[in-house]
Amino acid sequence: QVQLVESGGGLVQTGGSLRLSCAASRNIFSRYVMGWYRQAPGKERELVAAIRPSGLKNYPDFVKGRFTISRDNAKNTVALQMNSLKPEDTAVYYCNYAYSLGSSPLSSWGQGAQVTVSS
């Protein structure tokens, strides 16, 4: 099993930026898709960004152009740079990994990182 720990959450104003980091207990980036998910109060968890072993990135339309996922193989970390934040981005953000973009996450959910965007 791989342990994943999120950090970097905080409170920002609309239009602001935050950078989240996900630290993995071992390097899995060459074999699995890494993803960032979020869950807002009363809503289901949703994927917001993913990066494949090849480096190809995938984003849903509601964050495209504003969020950027990246990884550092030497440090076993995956980052999520969030720019032009909106109040609807407020949620707890989690990282996880999967066999492919369409498959279920493989790790248990951690504490996540709280992101709050004020209006």
Image (spheres, rainbow, N blue to C red):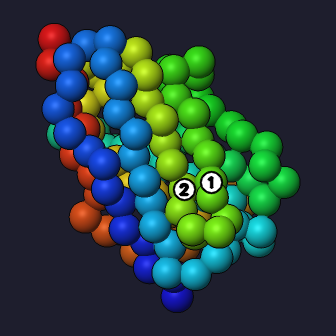
The residue sitting at 39% across, 46% down in the picture is: 20
Determine whether, in the image, residue 37 is placed left or right of residue 40.
right
Q: Is residue 29 visible?
A: yes
Residue 42 found in image quarter? top left
Residue 1 vs 80, above or below: the answer is below
Q: Nearer the viewer, residue 17 or 116?
A: 17
Crowding around mark 2 (Cα neighbors within 10 Å: few <14, some 14 to 19, many 20+) is: many
Label 2: which secondary element: strand
In the rendered image, the vertical position of residue 105 relative to residue 102, given as above or below: below
Viewer can see residue 102: no
> Residue 71 bears which disc, if any?
1
Residue at numbered disc 2: 78
Q: Residue at x 31, y 56 (%)?
A: 7
Identify the secondary structure beneath mark 1: strand
Q: Quadrant of the C terminus?
A: top left
Q: Are marks 2 and 1 in contact (CB under 8 Å)?
A: yes
Inspect the image, locate mark 2, and give the three-letter code of the amino acid beneath it.
Answer: Val
Amino acid at dot 1: Arg
Farthest bottom residue in view = 1
Residue sitting at 79 percent across and 43 percent down?
56
* Residue 29 located left or right of residue 55: left
The image quadrant of residue 41 is: top left
Q: Earlier in the sequence, mark 2 or mark 1?
A: 1
Q: Position of residue 97 (x, y in %)?
A: 58, 65
> Does residue 75 appear to the left or right of 58 in the view shown?
left
Question: In this view of the protein, which residue sits in the foreground, 6 or 90?
Answer: 6
Residue plotted at (58% across, 81% down): 26
Label 2, label 1: how many angstroms apart (C-alpha)?
4 Å
Percent across and percent down for residue 93 are: 34, 48
Q: Position of residue 18 (x, y in %)?
A: 35, 33
Disc 1 crowd, CA 10 A, few/some/many (<14, 14-19, 20+) = some
